[in-house]
Image (tube, rainbow, N blue to C red):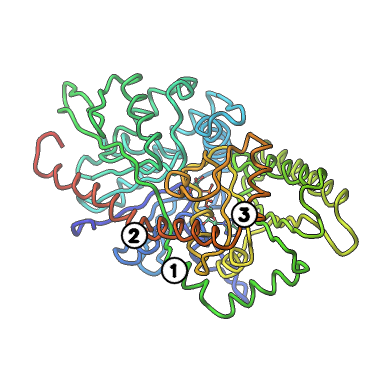
Amino acid sequence: MTGGRELVMVSNRLPVDRVVNEDGSTSWRTSPGGLVTAVEPIVEQLGCLWVGWAGSADERVDPFEIGSMRLAPVELSEEDVELYYEGFSNGTLWPLYHDVIAQPEYHREWWDRYRQVNRRFAERVAQEAAEDAIVWVHDYQLQLVPALLRQLRPDLTIAFFLHIPFPPSRLFAQLPWRKRIVEGLLGADVIGFQQVTDAVAFRMTAERFTRAPALGNTVVVPATADRPSRTVLAQEFPISIDAAAFAAVAERPEVRRRAQEIREELGNPKTLMLGIDRLDYTKGIRHRLKAYNELLADGEIDAADIVFVQVATPSRERVEAYRQLRDEVEVTVGRINGEHGAIGRAPLVYLHRGYQRDEMVALYLAADVLLVTPLRDGMNLVAKEYAACRVDEQGVLVLSEFAGAADELRDALLVNPHDIEGLKAAIVRAAHMPKEEQRRRMHSLRRAVHHNDVSHWAAGYLGAVQAAAESRQVGPSG
Ligand code: ADQ
């Protein structure tokens, strides 16, 4: 897939966590969930160098190896984390790119630090990457890296993948440093997006703010005095999961038993409804709880028949908007259980923690209904994991039209999460859906997930990157 070239991954966080062993020593293991799960099959096959932050501030970590990965840590200070990561990445870009659901903040000192840290990443890659390597830069924290890297190492083929949406041009226009970000991205040979709409928005934005004309799926970066013109592919490559691996876990007898046990522990409700999200304001958790509360209050669903399990993975806990969200969600959970619960019976089970994959799969198998109702989401892998796990072709997926996954999972019950009445109607419909309709819909969802699984995604993306690498070697336009 890389034509013998070294593969270099670059992401804000290295895909590993530090673990403390029984004897008090520490070692590293790959982190569950997240980026590494998506690219694990590729990395295992090809091996790679991975450049990123090891996760603790003000600490120098020497390069190390895990399996076929060589890890090269980039150091971040406490202040870098505050200004570049929590500030510009998660206080400016994250809300701006998610349709300004929360108000983005624009601070020059955050931007300055973002530039500095992006340069540090680019320099580290430039130092470490082999001649003619393929460098794959991930996500919104590192949008300046492609152009910086191109200056430092013109021999490299540079690919960028944006995991979150790219905003419409009229929203992106708010960003005081909009032109610099577009120029940073245009340093890449290939820019991958989750959805067609993201790729189109980017091409229009590039045209508007850098005068680089869009041509089909590409953006043409005009020639300068010292550089010929270049063509950048800016196209959608919707990310996916290792569907067969999830299905295999779902077939294991002990996982199926665990699913049964979960239902029993919850009092064998008629309907078990599930939500699994990072605790993030983009995920629509508040809207979901509002709809559920109203259904219980109206008597449209009976608290004796239903349990809703909401898993909310801890996330960005030092950012104010996330702290506020957590407080609000926890107050609402208390209110719902206080008003509609009984001794020994809570209609809402809220779990603020992470789980291992087996337990996640058992939860998917136990759930009659999965609610995935983000206000905006690049893709949403939870929706795809649910479909992959339902080897029994049962279960109902309620899915927001604002999740990238809605492009492929057309047979989910699609909802507009802002429309609380519509959301309530979908929940009631899901809870009462006949088995035959569940089977028909789930069959179609599973087919979509198996068709575009992670290896299909990776082959498509890396195929385009390799083609770019080859054309660079041939033509002067590279
Ligand atoms: P996220 O916003 O984190 O990802 P998502 O796509 O749902 O959202 O991925 C979450 C991953 O974490 C899933 O694989 C899920 O299984 C796992 N996970 C969630 N809660 C967990 C828990 N409590 N314990 C263990 N694992 C848990 C960003 C973008 C998305 C995009 C992905 C990938 O915001 O839109 O789909 O990147 O590109």
Cα separation between marks 2 and 3:
24 Å
**Which of the two discs, 2 and 3, labels the residue nearer the N terminus?**
3
Residue 352 percent across, percent down from the top left:
70, 55
Q: Which residue is mark 1?
A: 245
Could you tell me residue 222's position as x and y percent? 20, 23
- Quick check: 278 above or below 18? above
Residue at horizontal 68%, vertical 39%? 287
Residue type, mark 3 in image: Ile
The numbered disc on residue 276 is 3
Task: State the residue at coordinates (65%, 41%).
Answer: 423
Report if the CB atoms under discs 1 and 2 are less than 8 Å apart.
no
413 or 255, nearer to the observer: 413
Asked whether mark 3 and ligand 1 are closer than 8 Å, the reply comes as: yes
Tell me the kind of residue under disc 1: Ala
Using the numbered discs, state the Cα–Cα distance from disc 1 to disc 3 in whole angstroms: 19 Å
Q: Which class describes the residues within 10 Å of circle 2: few (<14), some (14-19), or many (20+)? A: many
Count numbered badges in the picture: 3
Which residue has dot 2 on it?
Answer: 455
